[in-house]
Image: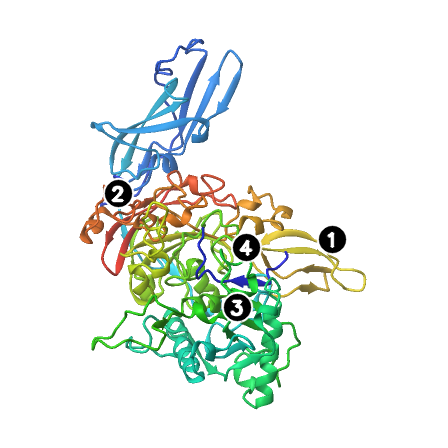
Amino acid sequence: MKKKIIAWALLGLALASCGDNPASSSEGGSDSLDSETSSVNGSNSESGGEDISVAPSKQRVEMDVVKTVIPEGTCFFDAAKPTVNFIDEEAGTTEDVTNYTFQTTFTITDKNDAGKTYKAGDLLPKGSYTAKARYKKARWTDTVDFTVQEQNVEKASEGKGYHTATVESLAPYTYQNYSGIETLGGSGMPSSGNVNILVIPVQFNNAKFSDANISEQQVRDVLQEAFFAENENGEDTPWESLHSYYKKASFGRLNIGGDVSSIVTYNADDSNLDGNNTGLAQTITLDAIKQLEAKGELDPTKYDANKDGYIDGIEVVYFTSQSIPDSGFGTSDSSGDLWWNFTTNVPGAKNVKNPGARRIFWSRWDFLTNTYYSSYKNDNGNPIGNRIDGKAVDAHTIIHETGHMMGAPDYYSYDKDEGPAGCVDMMDQNVGDHNAYTKMAYNWIAPMVIDGSSNNFEITLPSYTDTGKFLLLKNTTTDPWNGTPYDEYLLLEYYTPTGVNKMDSTGYPEWSNATSSSGGSAYGHGGTYEHAGLQVFHVDARVGSEKGTLTSDGKIDLSTGVLAYTDTPKAADAIDSASGTFETSATLYASNTKSASGRASQEIKDGATESPTALRHLKIVTPSGIDSFAGSTYYSTMGNMSNIFGTGEYCESWGGDPKADDGNKKYGGSSYSNFAMSGLFMNGLTFNDGSYLNWNWEITGMTDDSVTLHFVNIA
């Protein structure tokens, strides 16, 4: 799979319900469920205002269910598992029309209160019900009776409902170990430990910092603040520095230090450079390294913490007279991509004794200093941090790009026609925290894995932002988690507007201040979520490799290779001389950019039902079951509370309105079922790999710093 060689930033780029499902859980009752097949054929036709040309006895609908007794807290469709057939005796055909895309709908009615009706994907309280299947509007119907039974709900604990993985068990699977997964192909900046980076301010013959009356000391002060300020008490910089952000986000596992060099002048006018040649960033960086070495300023061994023979990270901040590309990277205008921000690799051989450049970040000075935080002051009324012409330091872009330095991808679409990840993530729209998948691949955190050791339980999950704890969920019977970040699963994180989310939760100024044609905000809330709620992602980080036979002289023969997904990804090509076989290193297939996704996956031979270009690497699961980020105006709902899960009671506690029309005033829902969320998955009721999630869940309680969830196994 061809690798991207550049990842770019978003800063400045104009990219383009609290009401709960009526379900509850309670303790007590029996754990045993009746399981039987029922075929109850009621009235098989209704006029619905249409003439029926064939007698009902010749054409009818029949609905069967696998179970007539299901546990409380599950939905009819997932737990009872109905099958609806349309039978035409005259034609001698029977057609399975269960799937709602065949115009089949379901209505669930409480037998003791006909005024209470539910949808097929709603989680149900205990009681007796009638389900009606309606095929093609009102023309054919059938009914079946079923019971929702109260169950014993266990309180989850380690080994009862879940088990907790360890960062040690995930350590072999970091981005740095997998060149076919790491977004820029390996040898990037380490994501753990004490890591020193080199920051180089660069100017041109015709565009110097002094032209803007910025002294070299001011340059170094701003860069020192942006990259390395401690900011423990919020006194050093208005938001975070690169160092303070990653120290918090990694829970102390990454400590970024380093140095700001003297200003380096590249011997050319920036107006004479080809703005469409991004390779010039590499040329200018290598020239800057030579100049620093000639001055005696550079000891490259200081910047190679992992001893791989490369400088761990070089971040170039350049001053230019060239304008920002009108619509960001990859657009055609008078300036060109060179005058944007991006991360790329510099070619060169590794040398442990004298490490050279490898991973570099190329960044505009004016992206680092802006007016967004110029009004922030400390408790004494004094401005926080440095100011240049009244402009304050803003590290969002360098934090995002350093994510690429460590191997993470962008989660926005380069095609700009959708927003798969839902905007609220540092590697999406440059705001807030990193999601749990990224942090697993950085080896900062490990999941609490729902494992099937209990079939009906409640679990309380603390703030993901503050603790790093999160739930990993997938089929626990036929397709359990493979123990690596590189699998397909759901992530459940209890987002809180604290820590690195805190300031962005009020709306990040670049996004929240942008107006639409109607005069309102073009970007919804324009930041991270303002209040606590459950953030859910569907991750498809499956990887594959080629397996084949060796040549007679023991070499890999790719012509014999068969590409397939693997649960045991190889970091390097593996050769088994005894058997004469090989397996290539693992490659990631899914992408959040449609045009970049699926080329290799089209060749996979494992029979998974998938549309390769529909494979998304990280996709938000919106509680409404409607993909509000599917179109080119996806950014209009950025940060709205309706994109995350929560209860009506908690919504009202922060002044929200469960019945509001405004998506930032309510949650989108409080529960998950396969049927209700089927519109978010390319295979409808199943994951991309064809597996069926054997769980329904709902939120049963929320506080400012924790959420309680009820899980029920529907197998």
Whether residue 30 appears in this view of the structure is: yes
Graded by Cα atoms within 10 Å as few (under 14), some (14 to 19) or many (20 or more), the crowding at tag 4 reads few
For mark 3, what is the residue? 172
What separation in Å lies between label 2 and label 1 (alpha carbons)?
54 Å
Q: Amino acid at mark 2?
A: Asp
Who's the residue at 47% across and 47% down the image?
418
What separation in Å lies between label 1 and label 4 (alpha carbons)?
41 Å
Q: Earlier in the sequence, mark 3 or mark 4?
A: 3
Q: Can you say whether 229 is above or below 95 in the image?
A: below
Tell me the quarter of the image containing the C terminus: top left
Assign a secondary structure to mark 4. loop
- Tell me the quarter of the picture where residue 332 sits: bottom right
Question: Going by the image, does 49 lie left or right of 88?
Answer: left
For mark 1, what is the residue? 560
Labelled disc at residue 331: 4
Q: Earlier in the sequence, mark 3 or mark 2?
A: 2
What separation in Å lies between label 2 and label 4 (alpha carbons)?
44 Å
Question: Going by the image, does 435 lie left or right of 566?
Answer: left
Question: Do the numbered discs 3 and 2 sit on residues whose CB atoms are within 8 Å?
Answer: no
